[in-house]
Image: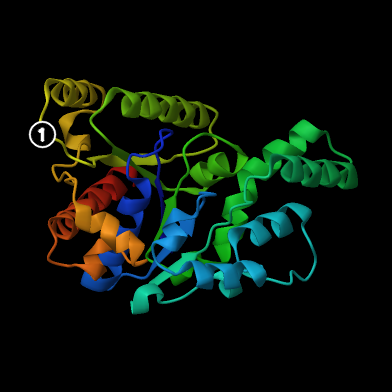
């Protein structure tokens, strides 16, 4: 059975998507792991990092995105017209073992989600609150359960913020990794995330464990950066901070324009080399975390 890993920080612009797609690509190419990327972000950046907008538009027309699976699962339709296996786009970037479950710009339509949950509550003769909690607890587990044995790792790319689907993904995950920039606002996003995780753990709804905090967009080592790093060292302990830091690198942005992770698009780039090191460290920390959890 594969492990679900959330790549998450409540703050936007900290490199969640870049970490997700590049680590996923390294795992598939360099370690022959079977990897599924799940794109939870309505900006669909992870999706567009591995396929063209034209192909994404085709998937959306065919309703082969996460949105369709979310709606079907909430409605509990009999004989679903789309299975998760059918929704998955396989061997992205012509890389065997690297698959993606595409996101959707309309994934977080709060009005539609509320309407679907209300209809489900009425049909089951349950309160709206009880139905909402049940959906939150089981939605992403139910969507991904049929393919858990098909993958070694499922990496979930989170949007910023907190909503029903992101909480459901956290509840479904075994582990989480926090990408962070060494700046105050990134720390705020981490604090919000840790409060949410603690709340879910204390209510016995999850046993999710932290793999570590990974710094992205490394700067010049200003006093502010050093203070932020010292604070996170104190809060998490140095053993939970990745030694590998991802530098700012224009080749990473250029690779996104070509709809490829930089580790595929330009393997010799500084950013690509850093992501290969980060992936090796990720696997080491994952093994240690699994042993501690066992």
Q: Is residue 248 left or right of residue 193?
A: left
- Check the image and report above or below for 96 versus 52: below
Res. 97 visible in picture:
no
Residue 5 percent coordinates (x, y): 39, 51
Q: Say which of 70 and 62 sits in front.
A: 62
Q: Residues within 10 Å of mark 1 (few under 14, many from 20)?
A: few
Q: Which of the image's four quarters has the N terminus? A: bottom left
Residue 133: quadrant of the picture: top right
Residue 68 percent coordinates (x, y): 67, 61
Residue 251: quadrant of the picture: bottom left
Report the number of discs. Answer: 1
Residue 236 percent coordinates (x, y): 25, 28
Q: Say which of 45 and 214 sits in front.
A: 45
- Check the image and report above or below for 69 versus 116: below
Q: Say which of 283 and 160 sits in front.
A: 160
Res. 86 visible in picture:
yes
Give the structural element (helix, strand or loop) at label 1: loop
- The residue that label 1 is drawn on is 220
Q: Say which of 121 and 38 sits in front.
A: 38
Q: Is residue 136 left or right of residue 206?
A: right
Residue visible at 42% across and 57% down in the picture = 46
Residue 97: quadrant of the picture: bottom left
Residue 166 percent coordinates (x, y): 54, 42
Q: Is residue 193 left or right of residue 220?
A: right
Residue visible at 42% across and 41% down in the picture = 208
């Amino acid at each position: 059975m594969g492990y679900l890993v959330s790549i998450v920080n409540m703050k936007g612009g900290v490199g969640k998507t870049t970490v997700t797609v590049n680590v996923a690509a390294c795992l598939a190419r360099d370690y022959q792991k079977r990897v599924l990327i799940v794109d939870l972000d309505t900006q669909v950046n992870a999706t567009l990092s591995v396929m063209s907008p034209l192909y994404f538009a085709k998937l959306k027309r065919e309703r082969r995105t996460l949105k369709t699976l979310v709606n079907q699962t909430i409605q509990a339709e009999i004989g679903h017209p789309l299975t998760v296996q059918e929704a998955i786009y396989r061997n992205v970037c012509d890389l065997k073992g690297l698959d993606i479950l595409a996101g959707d710009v309309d994934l977080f339509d709060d009005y539609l989600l509320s309407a679907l949950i209300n209809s489900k509550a009425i049909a089951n003769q349950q309160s709206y609150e009880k139905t909402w909690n049940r959906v939150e607890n089981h939605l992403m587990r139910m969507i991904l359960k049929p393919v858990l044995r098909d993958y070694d790792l499922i990496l979930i790319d989170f949007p910023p913020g907190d909503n029903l689907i992101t909480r459901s993904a956290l509840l479904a995950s075994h582990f989480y990794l926090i990408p962070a920039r060494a700046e105050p606002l990134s720390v705020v996003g981490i604090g919000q995330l840790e409060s949410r995780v603690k709340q879910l753990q204390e209510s016995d709804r999850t046993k999710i464990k932290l793999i570590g905090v990974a710094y992205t967009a490394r700067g010049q080592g200003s006093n502010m950066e050093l203070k932020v790093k010292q604070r996170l060292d104190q809060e998490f302990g140095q053993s939970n901070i990745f030694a590998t830091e991802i530098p700012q690198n224009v080749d990473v942005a250029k690779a996104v324009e070509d709809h490829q992770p930089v580790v595929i698009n330009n393997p010799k780039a500084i950013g690509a080399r850093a992501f290969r090191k980060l992936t090796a460290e990720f696997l080491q920390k994952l093994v240690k975390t699994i042993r501690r959890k066992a």
